């Protein structure tokens, strides 16, 4: 099984090749845009493995949430590679990749969304991945829903970015893995059971998961609910 994975939803961009359980990884160099470095790294990665794009069984990509520009880079690159070769795409969320990177049974993934907000998603470990509990939200640090049960771990860069959130997590008894960001290596591993279940989509269906746009209400919607414009 050959799966290429692309992840550029944060400043830590990367690509990875899964070949029957073995992983090869390339990290986008710091200080340069992912749009400039991702595809050259993909070509290098495939050339070193002597793998043609047409041989890939699937391409996994970080669908979001994350930096808007970064999400478009991974999605666009995945679509471009897939369309020419009829390869299915596997969109996987950055927060699930963060949760899986911890190996914890229950994990609250928290990614800095900038503009004073946090992307948040709670996950429980399953037999072949991590299942989202509820929905992915974007909200102020004070509004992040922290699980009331014991045994949860928090991860991501949001607690370091927002001291109030870090304080709330500490008061709730959650440890924090602030070093965790989504990576292509973890995406590739998550993609394996997805591909086996036949969850690949056509390249034309692929689109970034912005979340912020998804949950934001228009002026008309706010007015219809009795709010202010």
Image (cartoon, rainbow, N blue to C red):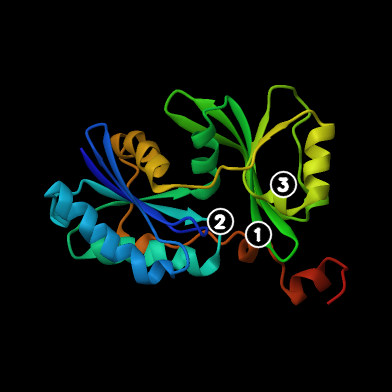
Find out whether the residues at labels 2 and 1 contact each other: C-beta distance under 8 Å: yes
* Mark 1, residue position: 113
Tell me if mark 2 has few (under 14), some (14-19) or many (20+) residues whose alpha carbon lies within 10 angstroms of its own.
many
For this view, does 130 lie left or right of residue 18? Answer: right
Which is closer to the viewer, label 3 or label 2?
3
Element class at badge 3: helix
The one of 47 and 110 positioned closer to us in this rendering: 47
* Mark 3, residue position: 159
Q: Quadrant of the N terminus?
A: top left
Q: Earlier in the sequence, mark 3 or mark 2?
A: 2
Residue 42 position, x and y percent, is: 26, 58
* Mark 2, residue position: 65
> In the image, is residue 210 above or below residue 36?
above
Q: Earlier in the sequence, mark 3 or mark 1?
A: 1
Q: Residue at x 76, y 46 (%)?
A: 144
Residue 129 position, x and y percent, is: 45, 31
Tell me if mark 1 has few (under 14), some (14-19) or many (20+) residues whose alpha carbon lies within 10 angstroms of its own.
many
Q: CA distance from mark 3 to mark 1?
A: 12 Å
Element class at badge 1: strand
The one of 198 and 15 positioned closer to us in this rendering: 15
């Amino acid at each position: 099984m050959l799966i290429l994975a692309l992840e550029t939803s944060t400043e830590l961009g990367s690509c990875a090749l899964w070949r029957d359980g073995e992983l090869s990884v390339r990290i986008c160099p710091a200080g340069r845009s992912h749009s400039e470095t991702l595809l050259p790294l993909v070509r290098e990665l495939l050339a070193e493995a002597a793998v043609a794009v047409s041989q890939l069984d699937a391409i996994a990509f970080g669908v979001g949430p994350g930096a808007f520009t970064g999400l478009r880079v991974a999605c666009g690159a995945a679509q471009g590679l897939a369309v020419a070769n009829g390869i299915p795409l596997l969109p996987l969320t950055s927060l699930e990749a963060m949760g899986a990177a911890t190996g914890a049974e229950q994990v609250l993934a928290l990614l800095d969304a900038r503009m004073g907000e946090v992307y948040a998603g709670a996950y429980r470990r399953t037999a072949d991945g991590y299942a989202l509990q509820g929905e992915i939200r974007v909200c102020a640090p004070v509004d992040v829903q922290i699980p009331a049960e014991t045994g949860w771990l928090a991860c991501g860069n949001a607690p370091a970015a927002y001291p109030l959130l870090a304080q709330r997590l500490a008061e709730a008894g959650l440890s924090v893995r602030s070093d965790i960001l989504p990576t292509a290596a973890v995406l590739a591993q998550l993609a394996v059971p997805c591909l086996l279940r036949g969850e690949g989509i056509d390249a034309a269906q692929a689109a970034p998961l912005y979340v912020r746009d998804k949950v934001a209400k228009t002026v008309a919607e706010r007015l219809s609910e009795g709010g202010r414009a």
